[in-house]
């Protein structure tokens, strides 16, 4: 098995974005009179669409979820997006993969208006052929929609059909979204997902460090753990 095209999630995969996201969620919840101190509950906001998270985790109506999302973005667009850091080994891995002729892409649920700023700010942009995220009105927010968008915008339909694309991410949404597009997914242990989450959702590969991506070449056994 050889993957020429590697799709990377952003939050929890390329960057440790948890502090910024959680601080902004707290900021939004406070406007509704909620003081959240449960870090594990706040971790659940990293990965899924914001609109879904406010509804599913706090029982907000769609109207209140949209209000919360607007308040969240008031802080995130100024401060939250830079309460962030690139995971150790990411830059070196991206450089090595690009030198080996791999084509790299970003497929993230983060709105593109923030995604581009983050990629530029942390020096990640030069490694990617194309980066796709969600739109601010949440009409393209689920991971399968975003992956399909990146495929289509990059004219990779034939590569998808040939099994040459690999999605790399840290949550079940990456696995589910990839599989809906008939793409294999590599789950990463350094983000916000768990081994149990990966196995339950059928991750094709599970790795412990960014450099392990290179070890996937030639491996065909599902659920391989590096």
Image (cartoon, rainbow, N blue to C red):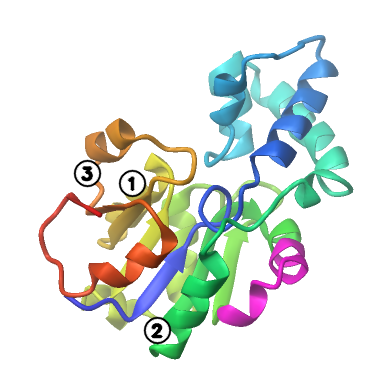
How far is the residue under mark 2 from the one under mark 3?
Answer: 25 Å
Is residue 118 highlighted in magenta? yes
| Image quadrant in which you'd find residue 201 | top left
Q: Position of residue 137 (x, y in %)?
A: 69, 48
Q: Residue furthest left?
A: 221
* Earlier residue among tags 2 and 3: 2
Q: Nearer the viewer, mark 2 or mark 1?
A: 2
Q: Residues within 10 Å of mark 3 (few under 14, many from 20)?
A: some
Q: Identify the residue position indicated by label 3 in the image.
A: 202
**Residue in view at x 65 percent, y 17 percent:** 60
Picture quarter with the C terminus:
bottom left
**Residue in view at x 85 percent, y 18 percent:** 31
Q: Position of residue 43 (x, y in %)?
A: 57, 30
- Asked if disc 3 and disc 1 are in contact, CB closer than 8 Å, the reply is no
Q: Is residue 109 left or right of residue 155?
A: right
Q: Nearer the viewer, mark 3 or mark 1?
A: 3
**Residue in view at x 75 percent, y 60 percent:** 113
Q: Is residue 1 above or below residue 225?
A: below
Marker disc for residue 97: none
Marker disc for residue 176: 1
SS assignment at label 1: helix
Q: Identify the residue position indicated by label 2 in the image.
A: 102
SS assignment at label 2: loop
Picture quarter with the N terminus:
bottom left
* Earlier residue among tags 2 and 1: 2
| Image quadrant in which you'd find residue 215 | bottom left
Is residue 13 highlighted in magenta? no
Q: Nearer the viewer, mark 2 or mark 3?
A: 2
Which residue range is magenta in the image?
A: 116-127
Q: Is residue 15 left or right of residue 216?
A: right
């Amino acid at each position: 098995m050889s993957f020429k095209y590697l799709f990377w999630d952003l939050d929890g995969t390329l960057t440790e974005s948890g502090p910024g996201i959680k601080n902004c969620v707290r900021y939004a919840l406070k406007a509704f009179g909620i003081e959240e101190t449960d870090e594990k509950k706040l971790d659940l906001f990293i990965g899924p669409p914001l609109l879904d998270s406010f509804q599913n985790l706090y029982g907000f109506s769609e109207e209140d979820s949209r209000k919360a999302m607007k308040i969240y973005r008031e802080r995130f667009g100024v401060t939250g997006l830079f309460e962030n850091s690139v995971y150790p080994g990411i830059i070196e891995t991206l450089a090595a993969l690009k030198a080996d002729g791999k084509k790299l892409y970003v497929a993230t649920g983060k709105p593109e208006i923030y995604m581009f700023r983050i990629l530029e700010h942390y020096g990640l942009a030069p490694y990617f052929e194309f980066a796709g995220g969600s739109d601010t009105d949440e009409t393209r927010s689920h991971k399968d929609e975003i992956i399909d968008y990146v495929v289509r915008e990059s004219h990779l339909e034939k590569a998808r059909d040939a099994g040459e694309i690999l999605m790399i991410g840290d949550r079940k949404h990456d696995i589910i979204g990839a599989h809906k597009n008939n793409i294999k997914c590599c789950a990463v242990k350094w983000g916000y997902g768990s081994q149990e989450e990966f196995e339950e959702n059928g991750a094709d590969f599970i790795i412990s460090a960014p450099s392990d991506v290179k070890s996937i070449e030639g491996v065909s056994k599902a659920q391989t753990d590096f």
